[in-house]
Amino acid sequence: MRRSALLQKMSAEKGIILFLGNVDSPAQYKDNCYKWRQDSSWLYFFGIDEPRFAATIDIESGEEVIYADDFTLDDILWMGPMPTVASQAASVGVSKTAPYATLADALKGRQVHFLPTSRYANMITLGNLLGVDPLQTTSAGKKGCALASRALVDAVISLRLIKGEEEIAAIDHACNIGYQMHTAARKAIKTGIVEQEIVGAMEGVTLAKGWGVSFNTILTQHGEIFHCHSHDCLVEPGRLLLVDAGAESNDHYASDFTRVYPTTGKFTTQQREIYQIVYEANELGQRLAVPGVQYRDVHIAVGKHILKGLSELKLVKGDIDEMSAAGVAGLFMPHGLGHNMGIDVHDMEDLGEDLVGYEAGQSRSSQLGLGSLRMARTLQKGHVITVEPGIYFIPDLITQWERDGVGKDYVQYQNLKPYFNFGGIRLEDDILITDEGNRRLGDNRLPIAPDDVEIAMKED
């Protein structure tokens, strides 16, 4: 069904579509590899979760061929009996197979449509197959890959952006694992232990219930550092612990939640004031995310709410709309409100972030914050996105803005000094856009209102 839909979208083109599955990636040597993960577009269109597979679809004839090699006796000695390539191909509706080494001959003299690749091994394979610089086969930036087929990229994005019922069920399942994962993290928080102990407790859930984590876990008392992957600090009393983590199901669909906890179970007045603003921003973002609305506009509305809350705390001053237009919200939330999610936790961004997250007529802002928005499109039924507002106090950024006179008419720099050791707060949920509006994914919602967080931590 998915390949038929793709072929229909590509009907105006000539030539052959090439899909490369991933190969094992050695960690230290050939037989000691990183954990196996298949290419997401390969999974979407072919579903065979084994290394060193490729496939072609002839746009003109419709013929589909899978290229792979049967296991040798030596392989079987180590791995046991394995299914044949032909049987695996038949299980996904492909009747013709060929050895992997014949792939190059199949492409000769044909216009080849391929997707950008992110794995170095596949970059080299594509380069050799097509006689191009391997480094030109990947999306190095937000704009996509110049050598890749734009027609194919657009077709794949249009299909994968709108989630089918079976995908929604798989994401719900991943979110249920994510709920258990985050619950284990919350229950494990104790002052005096090493952060790594909490990470171990939560990641153990993902391995027991699914494939593992959907991205490297972020767990830190320095919430102002967005991608803090070091977990060697002792949990200190009176701090905020930010937990941004997701689970990947055995079907390879993702979840992505963020919660922030007071390490001693109760927010200080200062912490609660900032937390309340972010909590309200999260609720607002979810209310506004409905079909027909540009997610860019939701980001802006959430930023204005954050500015309003900070204004009431006398951290900024002035007209909210003027501050928003001047980009002041970016000082406190330098990232975008959310991203697409599916088989990839940042779905399809390997194809080009702007191509996935922006539609015709939209362009990226140059403002800090809004310019980092990964999903700006008009929302449609079937979109799966994250809603993750935050407020961060980043001393280096605040100091630079003050030194350069940025936002001097709006930012109360002298009042920000007491927040230099605050850290940051981000609250993230995953939602599905529906006919009626949206719904949160997964059966349960992690505690998020400040009172509910404190109650849950007391009960733990």
Image: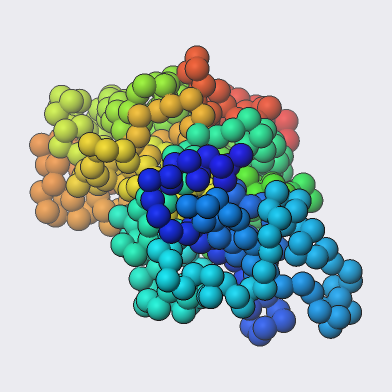
Q: Is residue 213 left or right of residue 7?
A: right
Q: Is residue 272 left or right of residue 96?
A: left
| Of the pair 102 and 223, the residue shown nearer to us | 102
Q: State the quadrant of the N terminus.
A: top right
Rendered view: 171 above or below 277: below
**Point 50% across, 17% down: residue:** 435
Residue 338 picture location, percent across and down = 42, 39
Determine which quarter of the picture holds residue 456. top right
Question: Residue at 40% across / 55% down in the picture?
Answer: 14
* Count of picture labels: 0
**Depicted 69 relative to depicted 88: above or below:** below
For image coordinates 50% across by 45% down, the residue present is: 7
Return the residue nearer the eye: 363 or 87: 87
Residue 263's spot in the image, x, y percent? 58, 43
Left or right: 430, with 398 as reference point = right
Residue at 31 percent across and 33 percent down: it is 296
Whether residue 33 appears in this view of the structure is yes
User: In this rendering, does residue 303 appear at all?
Assistant: no
Q: Image quadrant of residue 454?
A: top right
Residue 116: percent from the left, percent from the top? 43, 61
